[in-house]
Amino acid sequence: MELNKLISKVDNFIQSHGGYWDTAWLLAAITEELGELSRSLQMFAGVRKISPQKYEKSMNLLIEEECGDLFFAMVCLTNSLGINLERALLNTLIKYESR
């Protein structure tokens, strides 16, 4: 599925569940999800110890889930601000390619 279709699907889901939170709450959600991804990566790297019983998922699946959660939160923020995330990402890629 292409990015704009996924973004539209997220928008439809959010609209059917009461709409977007305000920007401060969306930023807080992004921060929270980034923290959860960071914790998962630290566990994967062995920096943070966990008991094996605590997580039923493999580390790869846990990290994948946290990446998805973070991306979902980012899509929510950009949608709420009327930003075309696909265009923003393409412009960033162009910027990096020209360096």
Image (spheres, rainbow, N blue to C red):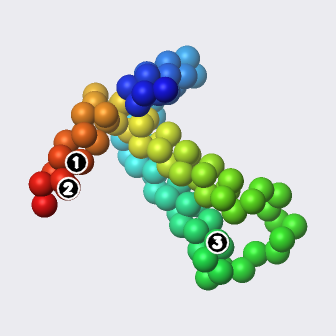
Give the foreground label among 1 and 2.
2
Identify which residue, 38 or 4, lies in the foreground: 4
Q: Secondary structure at mark 3?
A: helix
Disc sitting over residue 44 in the figure: 3
- The residue depicted at 25 percent of the width and 40 percent of the height is 90
Residue 69 percent location from the top left of the image: 56, 46
Q: Secondary structure at mark 2?
A: helix
Q: Earlier in the sequence, mark 1 or mark 3?
A: 3
Label 1: few (<14), some or many (≥20) within 10 Å?
Answer: few
Identify which amino acid the numbered label 3 is placed on: Phe
**Residue 44 placement, left or right of 53:** left
Residue 96 visible? The answer is yes
- The residue depicted at 46 percent of the width and 51 percent of the height is 30
Asked which quadrant contains residue 84, the reply is: top left
Disc sitting over residue 92 in the figure: 1
Identify which residue, 31 or 92, lies in the foreground: 92
Label 1 close to label 2 by CB (< 8 Å): yes
Residue 24 percent location from the top left of the image: 38, 46
